[in-house]
Image: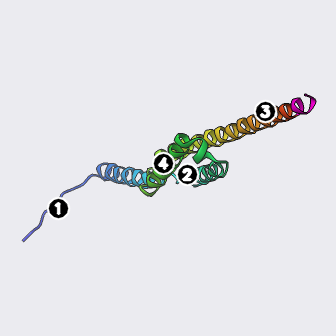
Amino acid sequence: MKISTANISSSHLRGLKLAVLALGSSFVLAGCAGNPPDAQYAVSQSAVNSAVSAGGTEYAAVEMKSAQDKLKDAEIAMHDKNYDKAKMLAEQSEWDARVAERTAQAAKAQKAVQDAQKGADELRQDGMKTTQ
């Protein structure tokens, strides 16, 4: 029995090889498309910690919660290898944390001014009592 084999032209075979090569390359590039935003995540984590230390949870609760929630969502996105989303969320978390920190610092400064004003008023009252 004679088996017939199909004659594949060399140009057709070359085209097939190029298609396979292109497809393989696209899979490799897709696998390396993004890198985890580890540095941005670390900066955001540090900013959140600084905001907490500055009193952000007390003086800027809304901004602080937003920063912490976005940082957690960034961590989830990194775990899911959605690096663009993770980076965006980490950046937003950093800025929310910075706003919370500045708000807390401003609130503390405002309180210090009020306390100083109250102390000055009390001294003034005591000085007026002694002169009468």
Q: Could you tell which of marks 3 and 1 lies nearer the N-terminus?
A: 1
Q: Which mark is residue 5?
A: 1
Q: Residues within 10 Å of mark 3 (few under 14, many from 20)?
A: few
- Local secondary structure at mark 1: loop
For this orientation, the residue located farthest to the right is 131
Give the magenta part as a residue range.
127-132
For this orientation, the residue located farthest to the left is 1
Residue 65 image position (x, y, % from top left): 51, 46
In the image, what residue occupies the spot 61% across and 45% down? 56
Q: Could you tell which of marks 1 and 4 lies nearer the N-terminus?
A: 1
Spatial separation of the CA atoms under disc 1 and disc 4: 64 Å
Q: Could you tell which of marks 1 and 2 lies nearer the N-terminus?
A: 1
Q: Which of label 3 and label 4 is nearer to you?
A: 3
Label 2 sits on what residue type?
Pro
Q: Dots 2 and 4: beta carbons under 8 Å?
A: no
- Disc 2 marks which residue? 37
Q: Which of label 2 and label 4 is nearer to you?
A: 4
Residue 2 image position (x, y, % from top left): 9, 68
Q: Which of label 1 and label 2 is nearer to you?
A: 2
Label 3 sits on what residue type?
Gln
Spatial separation of the CA atoms under disc 2 and disc 4: 17 Å
For this orientation, the residue located farthest to the front is 132
Label 1 sits on what residue type?
Thr
Q: Could you tell which of marks 2 and 4 lies nearer the N-terminus?
A: 2
- Disc 4 marks which residue? 69
Instruction: Please indicate whether residue 111 sits to the left or right of residue 68 in the image.
Output: right
Q: Residues within 10 Å of mark 1 (few under 14, many from 20)?
A: few
Residue 88 image position (x, y, % from top left): 51, 42
- Local secondary structure at mark 2: loop
Instruction: Please indicate whether residue 123 sits to the left or right of residue 67 in the image.
Output: right
- Disc 3 marks which residue? 117
Q: Is residue 124 above or below residue 54?
A: above
